[in-house]
Amino acid sequence: MIGTIFWQGRPVPFQPGESVASALNRAGIRAFGLFCGIGQCQGCLVAIEGRTFEACLMRCRDGVEIDTAGVTDA
Ligand code: FES
C-alpha cells in the first residue's frame, strides 16, 4: 500500500495508481454506486474537497477526504 484515503472518516488504504472506486470497493465500501467503471454512467459520483468527481476515474491521493456526492434517485 502507498497511502490512505478517508471515506466518511474511515481510513482506506490504496495501491499505487489505484482509482478511488477501486480502493473503496476493495475495502468493501459499495455505497457510492460503482457500475460501469469507465466514467459513463455517473453512478459513482463522490464529493472530494467540495467538488464532485467520478470515483472510477479519480486517482487516489494520500490523505484525501471523500464522501457521498449527495445525489439521490428521487
Ligand atoms: S462507475 Fe460509471 S461513471 Fe464511474
Image (cartoon, rainbow, N blue to C red):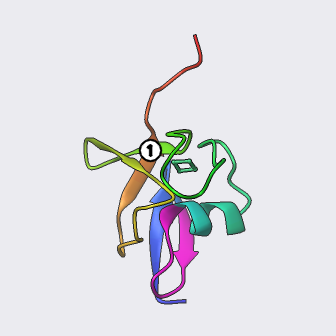
Residue farthest to the right?
A: 28
Residue 28 in the image: above or below residue 31: below
Relative to the observer, which residue lies in front, 44 or 64?
44
- Residue 16 located within the stretch drawn in magenta: yes
Instruction: Report the residue at 43% width, 35% height from top.
Output: 69
Q: Give SS at disc 1.
A: strand
Instruction: Report the residue at 51% width, 59% height from top.
Output: 56
Residue 72 in the image: above or below residue 40: above
Crowding around mark 1 (Cα neighbors within 10 Å: few <14, some 14 to 19, many 20+) is: many
Instruction: Confirm or reject: label 1 Cβ below 8 Å from ligand 1.
Output: no
Residue 20 in the image: above or below residue 41: below
Q: Is residue 28 left or right of residue 49?
A: right
* Three-letter code for the amino acid on which mark 1 is drawn: Val
Q: Quadrant of the N terminus?
A: bottom right
Residue farthest to the top?
A: 74
Question: What x and y, as percent, mark residue 23?
Answer: 59, 69
Question: What x and y, as percent, mark residue 22?
Answer: 60, 67
Instruction: Report the residue at 54% width, 41% height from top.
Output: 41
Q: Quadrant of the C terminus?
A: top right
Residues rendered magenta in the picture = 11-20
Residue under circle 1?
46
Quarter of the rendering containing residue 60 = bottom left
Question: What x and y, as percent, mark residue 24?
Answer: 61, 61
Query: What is the tally of numbered marks visible in this picture?
Result: 1
Instruction: Report the residue at 59% width, 18% height from top.
Output: 73
Question: What x and y, as percent, mark residue 13?
Answer: 55, 76
- Residue 72 located within the stretch drawn in magenta: no
